[in-house]
């Protein structure tokens, strides 16, 4: 009986190991939103994620309720269809439910640790409102603090936004 149980356990473990993908490709996830994702040549990308509320409030220089635990956000970045240069963004979700935050965005270079890193700067024309996002690759953005250092999350929430598609 023990031998049969051991063989069955090994078989199950091998099945699970074979079912896992060895690929390191970061693929955009399909949206779980009720509204379709904006698409077209005028869209640079749409990213969704959840971040810790209290620390993001500090980064944004805003006050939030003491019981605010997480923020669910979506960013839509628009570009000029011909030149592909950044134009405007729309930031929706928690804190911006009634009216999304909008503004200009720019691609800039450099973080505290990597002078060649590509960084998105929201509201470059209003430095007091600027938020910085590190472009990890085409499908992921990471929140940077005011010193352009990576913010590190935990088991429950991170400072990561993933590209979404329809």
Image (cartoon, rainbow, N blue to C red):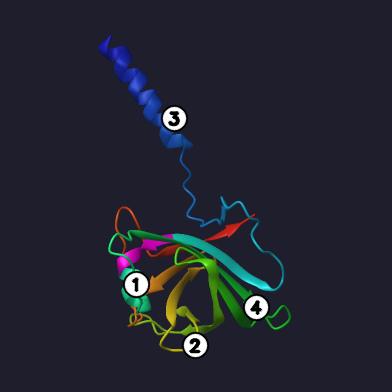
Q: Bounds of the magenta span?
A: 50-54
* Upstream in sequence: badge 3 or badge 1: 3
Callouts 4 and 3 close, C-beta under 8 Å: no
* Upstream in sequence: badge 4 or badge 2: 4
Callouts 3 and 1 close, C-beta under 8 Å: no
CA distance separating discs 4 and 2: 15 Å
Structural crowding at the residue carrying mark 1, measured as other residues with C-alpha within 10 Å and reported as few (<14), some (14–19) or many (≥20) = some
The residue mark sitting in front, 4 or 2, is 2
Helix, strand or loop for disc 1: helix
The residue mark sitting in front, 4 or 1, is 1
CA distance separating discs 3 and 2: 51 Å
Q: Quadrant of residue 111?
A: bottom left
Helix, strand or loop for disc 3: helix
The residue mark sitting in front, 3 or 1, is 1
State the residue position of label 4: 79
* Upstream in sequence: badge 4 or badge 3: 3
CA distance separating discs 4 and 3: 46 Å
CA distance separating discs 2 and 1: 19 Å
User: Considering only vertical position in the picture, is 118 above or below 66?
Assistant: below
Residue at the image position 40 percent from the left and 71 percent from the top: 143
Q: Position of residue 78 (x, y in %)?
A: 63, 75
Q: Quadrant of residue 3?
A: top left
């Amino acid at each position: 009986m023990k031998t049969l149980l051991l063989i069955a356990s090994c078989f199950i473990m091998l099945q699970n190991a074979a079912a896992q993908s060895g690929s390191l490709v970061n693929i955009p996830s399909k949206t779980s939103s009720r509204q379709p994702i904006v698409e077209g040549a005028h869209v640079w990308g749409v990213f969704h994620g959840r971040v810790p509320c209290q620390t993001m409030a500090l980064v944004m220089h805003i006050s939030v309720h003491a019981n605010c635990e997480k923020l669910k956000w979506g960013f839509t970045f628009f570009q000029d269809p011909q030149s592909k240069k950044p134009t405007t963004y729309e930031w929706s979700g928690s804190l911006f439910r009634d009216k999304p935050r909008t503004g200009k965005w720019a691609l800039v270079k450099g973080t505290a640790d990597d002078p060649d890193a590509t960084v998105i700067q929201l509201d470059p024309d209003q430095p007091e409102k600027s938020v910085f996002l590190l472009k990890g690759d085409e499908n992921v953005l990471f929140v940077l603090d005011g010193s352009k250092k990576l913010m590190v999350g935990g088991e429950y929430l991170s400072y990561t936004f993933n590209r979404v598609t329809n």
